[in-house]
Image (spheres, coloured by chain):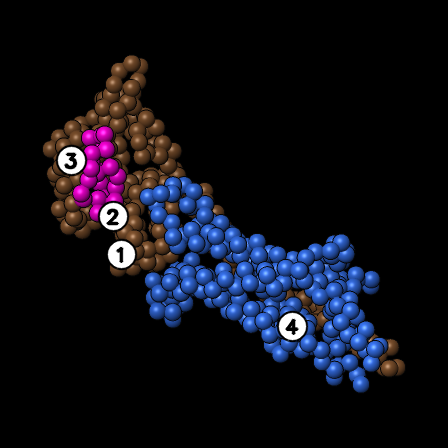
Amino acid sequence: MTEYIKLIDVTKCTGCRGCQVACKQWNSLPAEQTTFTGSYQNPKDLSYNTWTIIRYDEIVKNGSLKFVMRHDACMHCDWPACAKACPSPGALVKMPEGAVVHNPQYCIGCKACIAACPFDIPRNNPELEKMAKCTLCYDRITEGKQPACVTACPTGCLTFGLKEDMLDKAHKRAEEVGGVIYPNNPKYETHVLYILPAGIQASDLQHTNPKPSMPLSVLLWKNLFKPFTLIGMGAVIGGAFLHYLIKGPHEVHEEKKEGGE
Amino acid sequence: MASHDIKVRVTDVEERVAHWVLAASCLFCVLSGVGLMFHSWSIIPTILGGYYATKLMHIYSGVVFAGMLVYSWYLWRKDCSFEPSDLDWVLKAGGYLWPVKDLPPVYKYNAGQKAFFWCLIVCGVIIVATGLFMWLWSPAFFPNVLARIVYMLHAGAVVVLAAFIMIHIYLGTAGNPGTVSAMITGYVTKAWCKTHCPRWYAERFEKSEQAS
């Protein structure tokens, strides 16, 4: 199956927030009442009804101020921790195109995905007891269209295409601007990639994970404790059965002196 | 009269009700929890009325378990406090694994039963505390880096407790014939009581026997 990547060239972002609006429009998400928080960033954070925002960072490096605007949304991991943690089949699904799609119909509001996500992306609606996040516009990309945010981007910061083409483009562009590609963990691939401006590392920016991976606690939980719940119980039942066969039950016998009473 | 025919009461009604409410809520939590953890056990959520209903029942059964856990601690904490001779009992595996001659005489509960009780209390407190967190936490006020450790601990404590519960069930039924009635009618045979709780038996009944 063809895999896709959304490439975010941070050097080209002007912070117009067209992607935010397009996301709201396509996914029928209501606007949020916000207040000024001392930053151009608005809303302040992702929410159940805001699946992407532009994050603003003011970075002082070597005496000069850099202003970085970054489109922030689900990274669509190849090996998604959210879907691994999810107890309800069908609520969070890794699609062959690369998108990680949530299905509110099956979501039971357990918040396990929120705890598991290495990028802190899923958001909960406490009233509905449902989570929500970016779907990479799965309903659009399967129809041969681009994600809504990509179509709205006026500067070419957001582009979307085949995985191989986008990886090629990312490496060329990174070389061109002298920046790095984020995330750059070959063991934890994502279907969203960033090209950061020269001199900027992922660790300089808010709400990033410079070394993303499947969290160790999720691995212990799902790959060790989960099977060992049944393996442990099964081993004890098997051991008890063997004990019954070999040693036999502990019968209570009459004491000899009892007979004399 | 043979001591097999004489029955003595070893548990009172509060203990038996507490035991079975605790056991039922605990086993329901294990069952519904397995249904939620393993997609391959979807038969459990199907019977219980879907995944959301299973989540709710798991939570409410957990609330009952939490209440009974506190009551159980109150009921059995004294009977289950360890004494020096318990170490000797553990080193001899209670005579369950190899022949042992001079097993230290047990009062009401042996060291294995006491260990199970304290394992239940410790694992139960971890499970209840992490479970309450998983139910009520708001991601807006708590970092998910710590939350995922809580989810892991919830599952980790269950591994220990679930395995120990299976030992408890075996030794309370097939492994020790005549024991299960202690938690149903409350009565066991005099011979059983002399074998399993010799010091408690001597303190409670032998003095009165001599008097009569």
Mark 4 vs mark 2: give the one in front.
Answer: 4
Colour of the chain lettered B: blue
The span from disc 1 to disc 4 (Cα, nearest Å) is 47 Å
Q: Amino acid at mark 2?
A: Tyr
The residue depicted at 64 percent of the width and 70 percent of the height is B172
Sooner in the amino-acid sequence: mark 3 or mark 2: 3
- Per the image, the residue denoted by label 4 is B11
Q: Which residues are magenta?
A: A32-53
| SS for callout 1 | loop
Q: CA distance from mark 3 to mark 2?
A: 18 Å
- Nearer the observer: mark 4 or 3; the answer is 4
Quarter of the figure with residue B10: bottom right
| Disc 3 and disc 2 in contact, CB within 8 angstroms | no
What separation in Å lies between label 4 and label 3 (alpha carbons)?
Answer: 70 Å
Amino acid type at mark 4: Thr
Outermost residue, front side: B211
- Residue type, numbered disc 3: Arg
Residue A128 tag number: 1
